């Protein structure tokens, strides 16, 4: 890799880490970084550079919209652990409880009632923890 490519990757990583911390919060990112070892380091770098440094940092959609899309994707994929994290992120990105409820109601139609039922249980727990 050239020095120019190295610099671009470093910049993408730095931008990704800033975005990741803004969306998920310092405590969450600090825990993820602390758990990183030789086995997971490349994966952590990948998601920081590409998920957070490229996709979440793009100007085409605001973070509230990205959160709505991400919540839907987590429900559709049955990724309930990730859903909990992204419910917290959605609140940090300005979504209200009502808006999160509306997103989950929408998923009941397009992802299925059982998936939405599980998602509501996760979101209810996460939102109760906030109060």
Image (tube, helix red, strand yellow):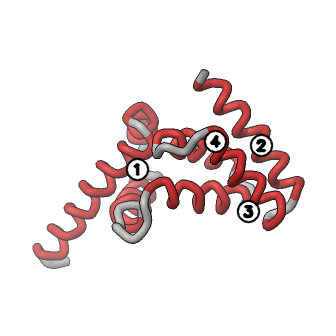
Residue 105: x %, y % from top left: 78, 53
**Is there CB contact under 8 Å for labels 4 and 1?**
no
Q: In this view, does 120 lie above or below 5?
A: above
Which mark is nearer the camera, 3 or 2? Answer: 2
Q: What element carries label 4?
A: helix
Q: Is residue 100 above or below residue 51?
A: above
Give the residue number, with chain letter if any, for mark 3: 76
- For the residues labelled 3 and 2, the Cα–Cα distance comes to 13 Å
Dividing the picture into quadrants, the one containing residue 4 is bottom left
- For the residues labelled 4 and 2, the Cα–Cα distance comes to 10 Å
Q: Residue at x 71, y 31 (%)?
A: 125
Give the residue number, with chain letter if any, for mark 4: 84
Dividing the picture into quadrants, the one containing residue 48 is bottom left
Residue 64: x %, y % from top left: 49, 54
Q: Which residue is drawn at 60% across and 43% down?
A: 87
- For the residues labelled 4 and 1, the Cα–Cα distance comes to 26 Å
- For the residues labelled 1 and 2, the Cα–Cα distance comes to 36 Å
Give the residue number, with chain letter if any, for mark 1: 38
Label 3 or label 1, whichever comes before in sequence order: 1
Label 1 or label 2, whichever comes before in sequence order: 1
Q: What element carries label 2?
A: helix
Q: Which residue is drawn at 18% across and 75% down?
A: 5
Task: State whether residue 42 appears in this view.
Answer: no
Which quadrant is the N terminus positioned in?
bottom left
Q: Residue at x 14, y 78 (%)?
A: 2
Label 3 or label 4, whichever comes before in sequence order: 3
Label 3 or label 2, whichever comes before in sequence order: 3
Q: Mark 1: give few (<14), some (14-19) or many (20+) Cα within 10 Å.
A: few
Q: What element carries label 3?
A: helix
């Amino acid at each position: 890799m050239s020095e120019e490519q190295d610099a671009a990757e470093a910049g993408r990583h730095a931008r990704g880490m800033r975005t990741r911390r803004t969306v998920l919060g310092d405590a969450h990112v600090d825990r993820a970084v602390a758990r990183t070892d030789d086995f997971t380091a490349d994966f952590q770098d990948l998601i920081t550079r590409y998920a957070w440094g490229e996709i979440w940092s793009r100007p085409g959609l605001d973070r509230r919209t990205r959160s709505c899309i991400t919540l839907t994707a987590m429900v559709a994929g049955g990724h309930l652990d990730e859903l909990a994290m992204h419910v917290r992120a959605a609140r940090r990105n300005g979504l209200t409880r009502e808006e999160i409820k509306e997103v989950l109601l929408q998923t009941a139609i397009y992802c299925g009632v059982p998936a939405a039922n599980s998602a509501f249980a996760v979101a209810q727990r996460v939102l109760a923890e906030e109060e």
